[in-house]
């Protein structure tokens, strides 16, 4: 006990002099390593005073434009909160008769609330330095104040309108670290940040995808699309999923909603042509492709979709009829496919997977031996 008192008295002397403040802090932390001392409230009070004195010195230097590491200021604030939150747990412990008599809560809550913004600022400071783990810790601590009994009377949940933004930034840091628990911890609060809700849903969707949770991934994509149909992340992935699951009607609903937003968009019109092609609505697909080509005759994919639609019409008819009339119609479809596919090939020579097989069928059915042999060689090369 005498040794403990001596250490505390020495630390108080350091604090009073404004020197050796880090040493004073370390002395108190050493005392707290002994489990017998962890319920001694006076040690925490001295520890807090040592940290606060460091914070005040740093703050004064910054105010006077003197050289000082800003990060140390934020670190001191973080330690101040940890210290008094731990002390509050002790302060709230019932005595032998089961009574709780709070001695410090009101004073300490008011004291810390004056510095709470620097938890948030510390998070922003570290986030822009891409120190995401440290940034997350600051944002997490800032948010956590809302559930700490120490700040219960402050009603942070209802008075702090920056909580959703802090939650979004915490989620962003967790996502950058590829830490699922960090990303999801404050996700519901982050969704209240209306300015960044699309990004929150994007990061959540990606997290569920990495987790292999297909159900939640699809649910989040739908939620994001409903919130912001034209946000570039959601609709392409929804269309991909619906295509994989052969949900043609759902895919068509997506592109139709996009076109309600912007009926002149080349991207949305092309997306609809692809959905119609996959759904077997070949005539409608060709109509849209012709509209796109009339607007912009350099859209390779529009030519290729139209050419594939014509070849698919030929294949479908060939399956159901071998009559002379139908054979004539089948050849006509291949003839119509030919210029589209050849133009698509010129515009997108590297996209062999889209035109080589189709041109092979066209040249085969139109008895174009030289061209057929070329396609055969291309397909064999892979």
Image (tube, grey):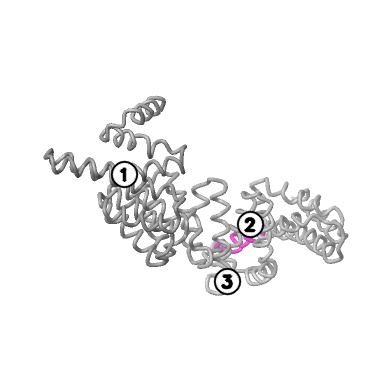
- The residue indicated by pointer 2 is 138
Q: Which residues are magenta?
A: 83-94
**Disc on the earlier residue, 2 or 1:** 2
**Disc on the earlier residue, 2 or 3:** 2
Helix, strand, or loop for circle 2? helix
The residue sitting at 45% across, 44% down in the picture is 210
Q: How far apart are labels 2 and 1 at the CA level?
A: 61 Å
Q: Nearer the viewer, residue 82 or 338?
A: 338
Q: How many marks?
A: 3
Q: Position of residue 188 (x, y in %)?
A: 46, 61
The residue sitting at 35% across, 50% down in the picture is 274
Q: Is residue 176 above or below residue 252?
A: above
The mark lying in front, picked from 1 and 3, is 1
- Main SS of residues in magenta: helix
Residues tagged 2 and 3 counted as in contact (Cβ below 8 A): no
Q: Nearer the viewer, residue 373 or 5?
A: 373
In the visual, does 86 lie left or right of 294? right
Q: How far apart are labels 2 and 3 at the CA level?
A: 16 Å
Evaluate whether residue 75 shows in this view.
yes
Q: Is residue 172 magenta?
A: no
Q: Nearer the viewer, residue 339 or 187?
A: 339
- The residue indicated by pointer 3 is 160
Q: Is residue 382 above or below residue 332?
A: above
Q: How far apart are labels 1 and 3 at the CA level?
A: 63 Å
Label 2 Cα neighbours within 10 Å, binned few <14 / some 14-19 / many ≥20: many
Q: Quadrant of residue 289?
A: bottom left
- The residue indicated by pointer 1 is 337
Q: Quadrant of residue 90?
A: bottom right
Q: Position of residue 78 (x, y in %)?
A: 68, 57
């Amino acid at each position: 006990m005498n040794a403990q008192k001596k250490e505390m008295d020495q630390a108080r002397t350091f604090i009073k002099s404004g020197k050796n403040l880090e040493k004073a802090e370390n002395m108190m932390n050493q005392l707290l390593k002994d489990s017998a001392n962890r319920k001694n409230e006076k040690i925490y009070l001295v520890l807090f005073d040592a940290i606060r004195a460091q914070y005040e010195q740093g703050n004064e230097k910054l105010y006077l434009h003197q050289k000082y590491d800003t990060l140390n200021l934020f670190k001191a604030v973080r330690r101040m909160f940890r210290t008094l939150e731990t002390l509050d747990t002790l302060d709230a412990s019932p005595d032998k008769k089961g009574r709780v008599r709070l001695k410090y809560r009101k004073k300490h809550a008011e004291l810390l609330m004056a510095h709470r913004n620097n938890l948030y600022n510390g998070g922003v400071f570290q986030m822009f330095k891409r120190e995401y783990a440290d940034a997350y810790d600051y944002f997490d601590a800032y948010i956590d104040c809302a559930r700490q009994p120490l700040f219960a009377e402050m009603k942070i949940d209802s008075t702090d309108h920056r909580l959703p933004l802090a939650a979004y930034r915490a989620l962003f840091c967790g996502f950058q670290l590829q830490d699922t628990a960090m990303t999801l911890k404050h996700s519901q609060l982050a969704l209240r940040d209306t300015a960044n809700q699309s990004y929150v849903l994007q990061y959540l969707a990606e997290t569920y995808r990495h987790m292999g949770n297909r159900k939640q991934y699809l649910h989040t994509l739908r939620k994001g699309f409903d919130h912001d149909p034209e946000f570039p992340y959601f609709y392409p992935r929804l269309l991909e999923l619906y295509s994989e699951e052969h949900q043609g009607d759902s895919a068509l609903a997506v592109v139709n909603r996009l076109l309600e937003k912007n009926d002149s968009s080349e991207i949305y019109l092309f997306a609809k042509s692809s959905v119609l092609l996959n759904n077997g609505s070949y005539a409608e697909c060709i109509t849209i492709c012709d509209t796109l080509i009339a607007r912009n005759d350099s859209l390779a994919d529009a030519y290729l979709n139209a050419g594939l639609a014509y070849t698919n019409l030929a294949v479908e008819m060939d399956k159901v009829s071998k009559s002379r009339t139908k054979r004539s119609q089948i050849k006509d479809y291949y003839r119509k496919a030919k210029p589209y596919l050849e133009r698509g090939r010129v515009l997108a020579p590297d996209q062999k997977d889209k035109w080589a097989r189709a041109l092979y069928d066209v040249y085969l059915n139109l008895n174009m031996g030289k061209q057929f042999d070329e396609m055969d060689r291309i397909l064999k090369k892979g």
